[in-house]
Image (cartoon, rainbow, N blue to C red):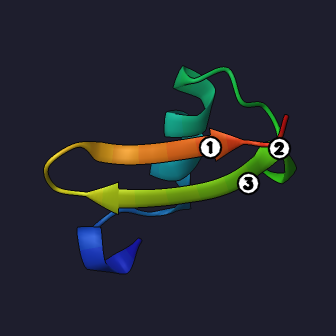
């Protein structure tokens, strides 16, 4: 998060936008400047 000048609050807002209420439901997440945040949830 530091490398993209963000914090945990920003991350949780991004999760909420995708209707992810619990971080334990996230299998994988990454960031690129081209496409932003990419999140894969557990099925």
Determine which of the numbered discs, if any, sits on residue 25 in the image.
2
Q: Residue at x 35, y 62 (%)?
A: 6
Q: Residue at x 45, y 60 (%)?
A: 30
Is 40 or 33 nearer to us in this picture?
40
Q: Secondary structure at mark 1?
A: strand
Please rate how many residues cluster around mark 2, counting C-alpha atoms within 10 Å: few if below 14, some from 14 to 19, many from 20.
few
Please rate how many residues cluster around mark 3, counting C-alpha atoms within 10 Å: few if below 14, some from 14 to 19, many from 20.
few
Q: Position of residue 11 (x, y in %)?
A: 52, 50
Determine which of the numbered discs, if any, sits on residue 13 in the image.
none
Q: Quadrant of the N terminus?
A: bottom left
Q: Position of residue 35 (x, y in %)?
A: 22, 43
* Label pair 1/2, CB-CB below 8 angstroms: no
Is 28 or 22 nearer to us in this picture?
28
Would you name the residue on which mark 3 appears? 27
Q: Secondary structure at mark 3?
A: strand
Q: Position of residue 39 (x, y in %)?
A: 55, 44
Q: Residue at x 85, y 34 (%)?
A: 43
Does residue 36 lie above or below 43 as drawn?
below
Q: From the viewer's perspective, is 25 left or right of 27?
A: right
Q: Nearer the viewer, mark 3 or mark 2?
A: 3
Q: Nearer the viewer, mark 1 or mark 2?
A: 1
Q: Secondary structure at mark 2?
A: helix
* Label pair 1/3, CB-CB below 8 angstroms: yes
Determine which of the numbered discs, if any, sits on residue 40 in the image.
1
Question: To which quarter of the image does residue 3 belong?
Answer: bottom left
Q: CA distance from mark 1 to mark 3?
A: 6 Å
First in sequence, mark 1 or 3: give its number. 3
Q: CA distance from mark 1 to mark 2?
A: 9 Å
First in sequence, mark 1 or 2: give its number. 2
Q: CA distance from mark 3 to mark 2?
A: 6 Å
Please rate how many residues cluster around mark 1, counting C-alpha atoms within 10 Å: few if below 14, some from 14 to 19, many from 20.
few
């Amino acid at each position: 998060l530091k490398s993209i000048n963000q914090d945990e609050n920003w991350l949780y807002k991004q999760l909420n936008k995708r209707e992810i209420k619990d971080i334990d439901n996230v299998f994988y997440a990454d960031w690129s400047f081209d496409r932003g945040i990419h999140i894969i949830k557990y099925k």
